Amino acid sequence: MSAKILVIDDEQDIANLLEVYLCNENYTVYKYNCVQDAIPCIENGDIDLAILDVMLPDMNGFSLCQCIREKYTYPIIMLTAKVEETDKITGLTLGADDYVTKPFRPLEVVARVKAQLRRYKKYSLSDREEKVKTEFSYHKLRLNTQTHECLLDGKLVPLTPTEFSILYVLLEKTGSVVSIEDLFHAVWKDEYYSKNSSTITVHIRHLREKLKDTSDTPQYIKTIWGIGYKI
């Protein structure tokens, strides 16, 4: 079954362009030019990935991202005409998994969509040997790669696909330092992703908030300055 992609962009040409390229990859595309029209599709919940423009006529894309994150964990890619680092960090902080700055190359967007869907759909490790561990634990933290669940003291912690992937990599190497470069390579396997430590930093901060952790006295994620992170 083809993945279902939600595209919301008030620029008709861009929305149409994305639709053409995504349909060429056999994805099912739900295209809208405003949030109001897209609400029934969003509330239906039958979406595998969302591509959201930041500047929408009836609602800020960041706010919409935040609303979606309150109920759903599927990947979200933000489209922004702004290049300021603060705008990118804002999107990641509110739960976005990736961002693309306009103007963009359609094939780059398609590559990012594929990367996000690959983590979201196949991170159960079904394509690896069966002997590979599917559950990791550290103190009160539990991560199950088959059910794609994270539990803290027995309570479910809602993680985005990117947050889940980062936490998995760190737990898999518990006690060892994972460099920022290695973390990028493990989570974003596609080479399109440039080295940008602030992206990892934002996701780590978000993870810490959800795990009720702090950078000063960490119980789970410890920063090794100048190198990376470790559990």
Image (cartoon, rainbow, N blue to C red):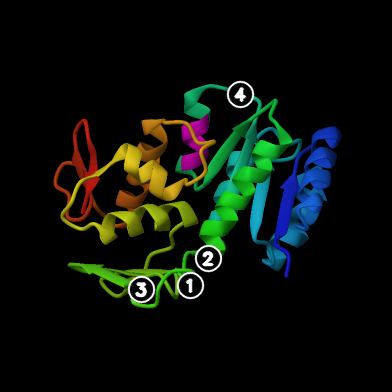
Q: Is residue 89 magenta?
A: yes
Assign the N terminus to one quadrant of the image: bottom right
Choose mark 4 or mark 3, whichever is in front: 3
The reply to whether discs 1 and 2 touch (Cβ–Cβ < 8 Å) is yes
- The disc, 4 or 3, on the residue closer to the chain's N-terminal end is 4
Choose mark 1 or mark 4, whichever is in front: 1
The residue located at (75%, 61%) in the rendering is 41
The residue located at (58%, 40%) in the rendering is 62
CA distance for labels 1 and 4: 38 Å
The reply to whether discs 3 and 1 touch (Cβ–Cβ < 8 Å) is no
Residue, disc 3: 134
CA distance for labels 3 and 1: 10 Å
Q: Position of residue 119 (x, y in %)?
A: 51, 58
Q: Which three-letter amino acid code belongs to the residue tagged 1?
A: Ser
Residue, disc 1: 126
Counting other residues with Cα less than 10 Å from the Cα at mark 2, is it few (<14), some (14-19), or many (20 or more)?
A: some
Q: Magenta region: which residues? A: 88-92
Residue, disc 4: 82
